[in-house]
Structures are given as structure tokens and as C-alpha cells.
Amino acid sequence: MNSLTSERLKQPDAAWTPAPGFIETTNVAWLMRQVGADSYEALHKWSVQNRGGFWKLAIERLGIHFQKPFGQVMDLSGGVENPRWLVDAQFNIVDSCFTAPPDSPAIIHQAEGGDLKVITVAELSALVDRVAVNIRYHGFKPNDALGLIMPMTAEAVAIYLGIIKAGCAAVGIADSFRPKEIATRLRLSQAVAVFTQDVIVRGGKTFPLYANVVEAGAPTTIVLPAKEGETPSLREGDHSWRDFLESRGSRAATMREPADAINILFSSGTTGDPKAIPWTQTTPIKCAMDAHFHQNVQPGDVLVWPTNLGWMMGPWLVFAALINKATMGLYYGAPTGRAFGSFVQAAKTTMLGVVPSLVRTWRNSGCMENLDWNMIKVFSSTGECSSADDMRWLMSLAGGKPVIEYCGGTEIGGGYITGTVTQPCVPGAFNTPALGLDFRILDEAGNSAETGELFIVPPSIGLSTTLLNQSHHEIYHADTPQSHDGSILRRHGDQMEKLAGGFWRGLGRADDTMNLGGIKVSSAEIEEVLQTIPGIKEAAAIGVSTSDGPSQLVVYAVCSEHQNADKNALMISMQNAIRRDLNPLFKIQDLVVIDTLPRTASNKIMRRALRDEWKTSQRKE
């Protein structure tokens, strides 16, 4: 989630305005000409009033390949909650990832301290084919779920696409997760095999990865070496990457239905287990469309976005780049220092994606000063709240280029609110709902409001329709209010404020899910870990957004009667538990020890009251 700073800006000032001549070169201008729209506002209105027509044009523009073409773009006979897309089509979405010239770069990559390397479209396609062939050779069948737990490397991208080309579903699990969380995700997805790396090398240090996968009780595992030429010691029944990859002939892509799952990703709700969200063959079309029209990605562009295939922006980057005939830039190391900035420069990056907390780190350290980032055409920011000042500073590194704020979710396959380079850029603010999508802002009484909870107006390609482990209807549609115009609404959980001049800013989450460093996690997941600590009777975890932007983790704890509460010692114990059992990237900002947690009549913890209390206490200090 992204937003402006906490001041209530009603008349935001643009920091960048597109020149008329530039607008004519954009992908949005092409679409406007196709439908005869005389303004962007008219174009967006057309895209939501003619959703089938919009997606047909987008699919044609993106050059999506079909073995058997669709007879109907959208079938709503089952209602907007259960649309059928691309009726009767047969295709494999991976075929649409290799339409650029064979000798053009598909991936530019660099390891820490290493040289810049390039993989062409032809080379990546050949490696994807080898992965797909060997997946089938080793006995895995269409619809099997295969785990992928490794850094975002060129090999990881090839494995990801190879899994899909073989007709299987890739189970994306972030390499920062601990064994317990890996085991949970393997269980929920029913993964029958795993691809991983022996270790992670970052900042000159080596961290275990294969060992964590083994401790998680993973099924048959294929292990890649972090350093070329090394041979990891393996558990009985596991395979080295070299042995797995022995060429065994060729096989065409497995043709599939539009609604078949290609990817299983996880997004925390307010229960202990994360939601297991399948991406279908149509979800990549949403990724590529957003990049095409909102980030204005064009053939030959170079897209760099530090991410991982365990989070939605990893798969998003793959499809956003390759379907648009652009290049991915992958840096194998921490993006927090100057070495990453030098990679951005050397790769001739044209679109740089960020998480706002990363920008704050760069700004505080000064590590990105005096680099040549003039090739950058646009920045894009997602994952958490933005600071307007930080985004202005970021723009200055590339001569004032705009930032496209981008907010959505795993269950959307992209954004529901974002920006476009055909309109002025206000740092930290959104300037449009995503094309093909619309939303309503409602107050607590269910009435239209300029500030309140945001509800999406379905349908759209990319919107999930099923969950593997929870009721999709109960999560997204049950008991939602109806729009004043009769539209059926879909719950998303964000708070939003409409500003003057066609801008919006986010106000955080309406539920108990938080974004920490760009990673979505539920209060319940954190609390489950904290309550294993001796002396902790109850704990409530909340995400708070300060005037500086990104969400921060604050813990309220009730201690046992005999516990002599030492705040510093407790914080260390809690941080160690989170690092060990959940995710080392989650950092506790503050701990508040109290006698009792506030609860509703139904015994639910009132986390919103705790957020308000903490913010009030900070203003008094």
C-alpha cells in the first residue's frame, strides 16, 4: 500500500507533468486512439463500461498466443464473482513470453562483485524448454505443484517458466522464510517437489537455504549451487541441478485451459495460515497489461525491481517484462548499497521498481548519489506507504522522472489503483484506478464517501476466484455492501482518501493485515510466534504508519503475573523468535507492556484502538 505523508493534502502539487509530444508516444495514447477517447478519464470510463472490449484490445496489443482462440472474452453467466475468461481457449502463457527477437536480451544479471552478464531470448527459451522436458521426464504431471524457494536469479526465472510450460503450478515461497513457514506453505499447496539453492550469498556472507528446506520436511528437492561449479552435499533422493538438467529431447508446451493454475502464492489474512492464492493462465495478462499501460513498458526497455518469486512482484516482473518484449535486470545481492545502484546504471535501466523503505535507506546513507540514472524513464513504488519527500528525492536521482505509485495485491494479479505517465505525477499519490477496474469508497454506514474503506467493482482479469484453503466468497464477497449504482462489490481491506484534482492517497489497512518491508503478514501469524515466549501471556501485533511512510511493527504484550517485565530483554526475545520462526525481515519498532488488551464484546482484540493509542502516545512525546 502506498500513500502520501500523514498531512491531509487536499490540493496536491504535481512534481512532474507530461509534455504533449511525449503523451503521443505512450501506450495509453495508442489505446485512446483505438477507442476514440478524447481524454484519459474518458478512456478509463470506457474500459470499465466495456470490459470485454477492453481486454480483447489489450490481449491483441500484447500479442498473447493461442493454440485455440477464445470464442468469448468474458462469460458472466455465473455472476461477476465467478466470471469465465477467454472461453474455449487453449494455450500456454509461456509461449507469449518469447516473442521478442531471439538475439535480444531477456535477462541482464550480476552477482555481488561479479561481471554483468546477458542471457538472450533464445538462450532463456532453450533453458525453459530443458526444465519443462526434465520435469515431465522425472514423472511430474500436469497440475502437480512444484515448490520454488530460491533467490530471483536467471535460473529461478527459467525454472518458474519451465514449471508452467510443463503444465504444472509453481509454488512461490520466499527464500527468507524459516523452516516452519516453508513447511506450512508446502503443506497448503501439496507440493510434490521443490527447487532450491544450496545457500544464499549476500553481503559477502553465506546463509543456509537447502538446510532450511530439508528441516521443513520438503519432498524430493532439486538443488542448485549458489556458485557455479560447486556440488552441494544432498539428502538421499534429492538431485543436483546438473543431474536434473540432462537433456532428454524436446517437448512442446502443454496446452491448458484459461482457468488452470500456473502459480500458487500466499497472502496473509487475519487467520494463522496464510491464504493460498492460485494464479491462473490469465493472471499474467493482467501483469503485462498494467506494465504496458501504467508503467508504459515498451520493447527494449530494461526493468529492475528487487523482489522474489515468493512475492507477487516476482512473477509480475517476469510477465511484465517478457510479454512486453522488454528485459529483466536481476542483481544477486542486497539492493541497499551502492553496488546495486551501479548495477542499475550499468544495465541501462529504464524502469526501476522500489519498496518505499528501500528508498529511505538509500536517502539516509547517500549511497546512490552521483550515479548516472538518466536512462530511467519511470520509477514505480509498491508494497507499503510512501513518503512524498522520499519520492521527490528519488525522482531527483534521474532528473525528475515520475514515480508510478502502484497498489494492489496477490489476489488481484497487479494493481487496482496506480498511475499513468499521461497525467501529472504527485509524489506518493495515485492518479487513476487501473484500466479495466473500478472501485468505490464507502464510510462505515456503507455510503459513498471521499474517505473510507475501498471496495473493488468486479470483474477483471487477474482477480482471484478461488482459494485453496479458505472460502473465497467468505473472504471477499460475504456481507459486502452494495454500491449506490447497484454494482456488486468485492472486499479488499484498504482505506483510501480521494483528493482534489483526480488524485487519491492510501490510509492503511482496514483489517489486521500489515505490510512490513513490502511483505504482507497477518497479526495472527506474528502473535502466534510471540506467545511462545516464556512470560508472555497475550500479545497483539499492529502495523502503524508514521508521517515518514512505511508501516512499522508495534507489539502490545500482557505479561504473566510473576514476570518482571524488562522491556529491552523482552524485545530481544521477541525479535529473536520472529527471526527464528517467521521472517528475519520483520523488525519490531516498539514494545508496549500493558495489563490487559482491549477487546470487543465478542472477545476480539481491538487492534485499531491500539493503533490509535500508540499514535497518540507518539504525538505527546
Image (cartoon, rainbow, N blue to C red):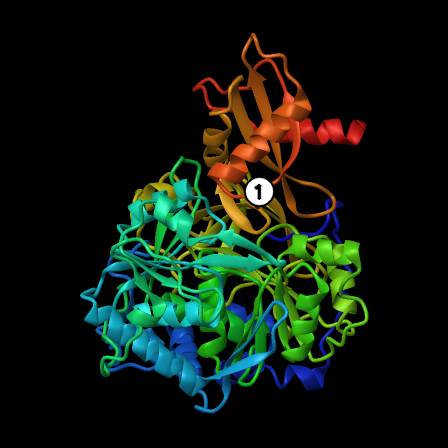
Q: Nearer the viewer, residue 160 or 500?
A: 160
Is 378 rendered above or below residue 268? Answer: below
Is 168 rendered above or below residue 422? Answer: above
Q: Quadrant of residue 562?
A: top right
Give residue 226's position: percent from left, percent from top.
Answer: 48, 64
Question: Which quadrant: the C terminus?
Answer: top right
The residue at 45%/61% (across/down) is 309
Q: Quadrant of residue 264?
A: bottom left
Give residue 609's position: percent from left, percent from top.
Answer: 60, 26
| Callout 1 crowding tier (Cα within 10 Å): few <14, some 14–19, many ≥20 | some
The residue at 69%/67% (across/down) is 339
Residue on which the image places disc 1: 586
The residue at 74%/26% (across/down) is 617
For label 1, the SS is loop
Determine whether, in the image, residue 427 is placed left or right of residue 116: right
Q: Is residue 477 visible?
A: no
